[in-house]
Amino acid sequence: MKKIYSMFSSLQDKLHRDKGEKKALTPAVDAPPPFECTHTLGRPPFFEYLVVVSVRKRSSGDEGYEPQIIYQFPKAISQSQREKEELCLKAITLFCFPEGVSWAPLTEYHSETFSFVLTEMDGSRRNGYCRRLLPLGKGARPPEAYCIISTLACFSLFSKIFDEVEKRRQISMAMIYPFMQSLRETPFPAPGQTATIKSFIPESGTEMIRLTRPVDSWLEHVEFRSLFHCLSDEEVLQVFAATLLERRIIFIAEELGTLSQVLHAVAALLFPFIWQHTFISIVPKVLLDVYLAPTPYLLGIQRNLLHLLSEHTDLLIVDLTSQSESKFITRIGDEDTLIPSRLKEELLQDLCRRKHNPTAEEMNSVVSEAFISFFVKTVGHFADHIKHQGGNKQLRTFQKKSFLKAVESKENRNFVRQFIQTQMFDLFIQEEEKHDNHEGFFHKKILEFQQRRKERLRNGGAKGLVV
């Protein structure tokens, strides 16, 4: 984490140079949200605060426009709270309008919803959900962004909340307050459960707003449809392979929503492993130099900033725009050969099981099952090679040599040998060494696979856990 913090020190300097404030937050470090939100002291509230950000002319007299917060709920009560929030609020304006100062009043603007993550120095994360649109009015006017900050990761649920906020904003800014107050006082529902909120709107009366949380909580911040809409199955596998080996990858798109959805989807393909390096789903223009970092990263950059990327060595740059002739602007060249041929064929077959026009839930189910199956087949035997050290029942260590030897196929073994050198695999094994617990979702899938293998063996099928 220290590498990540130092990487973004330039942003810290830019945000602090006017006041010389104490550096307490690293707002620009974005990371995939955890797949499950667990809370020991009951369910948390929906959000911490809502801000509305607009684009205004620079007050200093300089040319151009800059984003400014025009509404915040709830307001900071104490001076210490205001000081603590100030840096975070400045970072929010950067992510709501990452293009910088190149704005002007508009008469037409396509509404879009996207997300980002703010990471504090202690590693704790807060999710930012943003809807950007053109407010009601006549003539040219600046766009607005509604941004909700929450410790919770559930993109679909917050999209519905934005629908309600937008409806009230069209009446009056004052109508937002009672709805958000009721929402803030409501506990976040458990997976599969519904929270009901009463809200009054003039001429409509009291409405009952029901917000239902998806059953599969580890996928509630992810929607795979955007990823597979932008890329073919074969192209997704090439991106997946490069991500597995922790390379430097940049995604290019015009829409902020496409960038945030695709990057979170790519990170979710790695489950049960977690991307451990720099992850910024939407890179503000002021932070664009981060692409020069020598360490692995997943970055989302708007297409109008592509010309500013002058150094392309050892990068995979993926163009998500529909009109692009080739989806890979630059590449290493071996992405299509990293995954063993038989495993690649099985992955493609599994992905073909999705319906022609699937719902988000159906798409998430088919895609997640396909990639979890890939990890079960390649490294699902890891638990058999975590052994107690000597007579110490508390100390358990991973036996890498015996683990690799158990992979029967030479092609698969070469791939696994590369994958186990990654930081994501190393940290996964470290956690497994600490806990002799086989009740997780991944362990369940491994057990199901082992049971099917035993049945095949009884019926004269193929041998071996790892295919």
Image (cartoon, grey):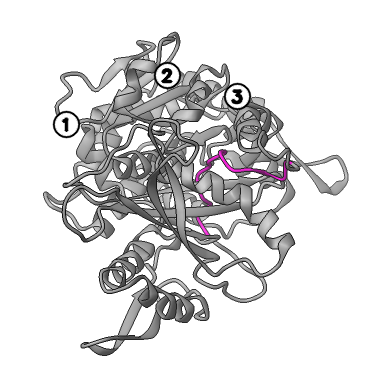
Q: Is residue 374 visible?
A: yes
- Name the element at disc 2: helix
Note whether 319 is above or below 456 in the view shown.
above
The dot on residue 421 is: 3
Between residue 317 and residue 427, name the one nearer to us: 317
Q: Which residue is mark 2?
A: 411
Q: Is residue 29 magenta?
A: yes
Residue placed under numbered mark 1 in the picture: 322
Instruction: From the top left corner, tell me how far across and down residue 267 is, in percent.
Output: 44, 40
Magenta stretch encompasses residue 263: no
Q: Is residue 98 above or below residue 144?
A: above
Closest to the observer: 90 or 265?
90
Going from the N terminus, do you reach mark 1 or mark 2 first? 1
Residue 294 left/right relative to 244: right
Tag 1: amino acid: Ser
The C terminus sits in image quarter: top left
> 408 left or right of 266?
right
